[in-house]
Each structure stands twice: as C-alpha cells, then as structure tokens.
Image (spheres, grey):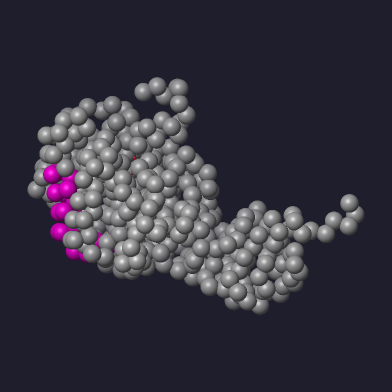
Amino acid sequence: MQRTEMSRRDYFKLLGAGACVTASAISVGCGGKGPEAPTPEAGTTQESAEVKADRARRMKWWHEAKFGMFVHWGLYSVLGRHEWAMELEGIPVAEYEQLAKQFVPKPNAARAWARLAKQTGMKYMVMTTKHHEGFCLFDTKYTSYCAPKQACGRDLVREYVDAVRAEGLRVGFYHSLMDWHHPDAARCATDETARQRYIEYLHGQIRELCTNYGKIDVLWYDVAWPLDAKGWESEKMNKMVFELQPDIIVNNRNLLPGDFSTPEQEITPEEGGRAWETCMTMNDSWGYHRADDAWKTPKTIVRNLISCARDGGNYLLNIGPKPDGSIPEESVRTLSTVGKWMEKNGAAIYGTERCRASWHTYLNYTRKGNTLFVHVHFWPGATVAIGGFQTKVKSARLFASGQKVNFEQTDIQTKFTGLPEKAPDDPVTVLAVECEAEPVIDSLLVRKNRKREQV
Ligand code: GLC
C-alpha cells in the first residue's frame, strides 16, 4: 500500500472504504458517491415505463421519509477502534475470532435504538447484518460464525427487526459482499471454484435474510471487492431478492444501479431525477470508536438533513452502539436535540420535493408544492433578505409558531421584516413562504439585473 503516493481519498477508494470522513461535513468530504457507485441508469429513459412505475411504487414511502438511522454493530464494537480495525491493524483471523466470546450484548438493545430513531423523527433503520469482518448477527445455516451460535446465543437481527417494527419504522438490512473472514472471499477473484462456493454462501445468506424476517423494506449492499457485477452474479442476486420481497428497495453497491445511489460522507445530489441517499457518521467512525470525539453538532446534522431534502435526497445518519448495545451518550444527546427540532419542523422536511433555489450564506431551502421553507441557520436579526426570488410571494409565517411575517418584494430582493432580533428557534428557524407558483430563486439574477447607475 503506497499510501504516501496517493491522496487520502484515492487511498480509501482503492480499499473500497468509506472510512474517509470529515468532522462536520456540509457538502464537503472525501467519501464520494460511495466506493461502489456505478454509472446511474435507474430512473433514466433506458427503462420501460413498467419498471419505472414499479420503482416509483416501491420507493414512495422512502422519498417521503427523508431521514433514516444507520446502525453499525459487530465484533469490532468490542474493540471500540472503528469497524475497519481487523484490516487496518492487520489482526489475524484466529485472534479476531476470539472477540465472538466477548460479544454478549444486553437483550433487546435494539429497542432503545428504535425508540431514539423514532424520537429523532427518523422513519426507517438500516442495520449491519454482516459487516466486512464476516461475523453474522443473524441465524444462518451457512456458518457457525454468527451471534446465535457464539457466546451471544441470540439472533440479533431478529431482536432488531422486532424493535424497529414495534416503533412503526421501516426495516433495512445492510450486508457486506466483501468478507475478511470467509476463506473464499478474497481468492474468489482468481479461483473459479472458490468463487462458486462464496457465491453460494453469499446468495444463500441473502436468501435467509429475505425469507426469515418477514417484510424487509431496504436491502443495503456494501463493498463489492474483489469481483465485478458478473462475478457477484448481481443480476441473479437482485432477481432473487425481488422475488422474495416484491416491495423492497435495493441500493447500488452490488455494482448494479439498483433503486438509489449512496453518496457517502458527503451531500452530492444525483442528476436526472435518480434517487439518492447520503449516509453519514456522527463522528468519524461507523462502528463504535471509544476515542473518536469528532462529533458533529445538532446544527450540522439539521443543516445536512435540510441540504439532502432540498435536492430530493435522503439522509441516513449512523450510530455505532457499544458492545453491550448501548448508544454512545454524545449520539443520544445530539439526536435528542435534533428530535426536538423535528417535532416542530419535521413537516418542512417530510414529503418535500426537489427545490429550485440557489445558495445563500445564512439560510437554505426545502419545498412542498408552492410553499418554500426558508431554513435560517445563522439568524441575521429583524430582516431576512433573499436576492433573486423569482416567484411572487403571497404570504409568510414563522413555521413553528404560525406567526404571520411581513414581507416586501421587488424584482431583485425579497425581504421578510419585523422579525425578532434573536433567532426564535434553535438550531435553525424556519419560515414558510406561500408563493403563487413553484418557487424559484436564482442568485445570479441579482448579478445580471442589479441597477448600477453610478458606474
Ligand atoms: C464503507 C465502509 C464501511 C461502512 C460503509 C457505510 O463502505 O467500508 O465501513 O460500512 O461504507 O456506507
């Protein structure tokens, strides 16, 4: 690994890792569009109307949901040094396996995760059923390297599924194609018999996951090293999944376009109407890392969620529970604050549509029909001014309180006036602005049309 000769971003791309992160990423980061993202095709004209209609049907709830919880949990949680510890520290397989003796979480730990997700305003959850380390949290006939057959003695996926459903949330499964434990999972690149064995193992386990737990809403593949889509038999994989779960949605990380793209640690919208979901950590690690203190603030998280919703995307925000299943205190604190904001302002996020509004330094936007939600994250005082607002405003109010807001509008500038000096809400204050048509804001319009009489 010639790490010094390549950028950090390239290094992690090569590894297929999403471990490259920023502490407070708002549209900045190095995770990219996800390590495995293929050229998007789903949602383009190459598909039949029937395929498109079926996707629209399956994805309706997900587009409305906007906000989900990702959960990374496994033997790496015992180490507490990031989910890539086995590989990055070069821990021998036999030594790593011993962690299965110590991984005995408290029963039904997932209930607290699901409760927190619900309180935070998240609508779905996605949990690692098997991460790259190869340890399975579910009951499988294909290996004894799984929670029910090791010290834990319980099916942790079953507990998770029950907990998520009890809160009325949608159930998602993450599953890693790459496997550092299975003897065939690396040599399958060069040995056809090994490939066939590993495919039987992988497809067999995906079949178990799609058969034994009732209705599953999301299947979230990850890291397709070392094969290509043909080698993984990804077409066959998806076909099986859709036969077993006709309403499910799948991502693009088995090297097929799937239903949605997976930008990682950054907010990079897809073009052409294709669905996308930014997944992001709350600190710099997906799995529990006891020393990682690079926590994002509630404001950063709320702003990220708004940015995703503005451009038609979803935000899948991660927690990395401790080995006993408890959630790191910082995550609980931060998500509770986010939840309080969502309670009052969630309606400005859920079910919103792509918004044609350009950037501003102290606010951002979401949209539902002809209503523009103006999310002010750095409160300017009594007046909030927006240049290049091209649509006629009919009325405005402070969204959380419903209090009417006065406004003045010219071709160039729209001003909301008489507002409190101090931000009425925290961490972001929302104004709801009713417009005559779909709101369009183009800040370039100011540059082009500003009167410059003195020059
Ligand atoms: C990457 C990482 C992994 C994490 C995932 C989440 O692929 O390898 O650790 O699970 O991204 O998107």
Residue 292 in the figure: left or right of residue 380? left
Q: Residue at (58%, 71%) from the top-left corner? A: 438
Can you name the residue that lies furthest to the left here? Answer: 141
Residue 214 in the figure: left or right of residue 370? left
**Percent coordinates x, y for residue 449 in the rendering:** 77, 59
Q: Residue at (58%, 67%) from the top-left corner? A: 373
Quadrant of residue 446 in the image?
Answer: bottom right
Q: Residue at (20%, 42%) from the top-left corner? A: 135
Q: Residue at (68%, 57%) from the top-left corner? A: 443
Quadrant of image for the N terminus: top left
Can you name the residue that lies furthest to the right here? Answer: 454
Q: Is residue 10 visible?
A: yes
Q: Is residue 118 visible?
A: no
**Boundaries of the magenta span:** 200-217
**Percent coordinates x, y for residue 174 in the rendering:** 28, 50
Q: Is residue 206 magenta?
A: yes
**Percent coordinates x, y for residue 316 in the rendering:** 40, 54
- Assign the magenta stretch its main secondary structure: helix
Q: Is residue 213 magenta?
A: yes
Q: Quadrant of ligand 1?
A: top left
Mark count: 0
**Percent coordinates x, y for residue 134 in the rendering:** 21, 40
Q: Nearer the viewer, residue 79 or 354?
A: 354
Q: Nearer the viewer, residue 424 or 44?
A: 44
Compared with 289, 110 (above or below) is below
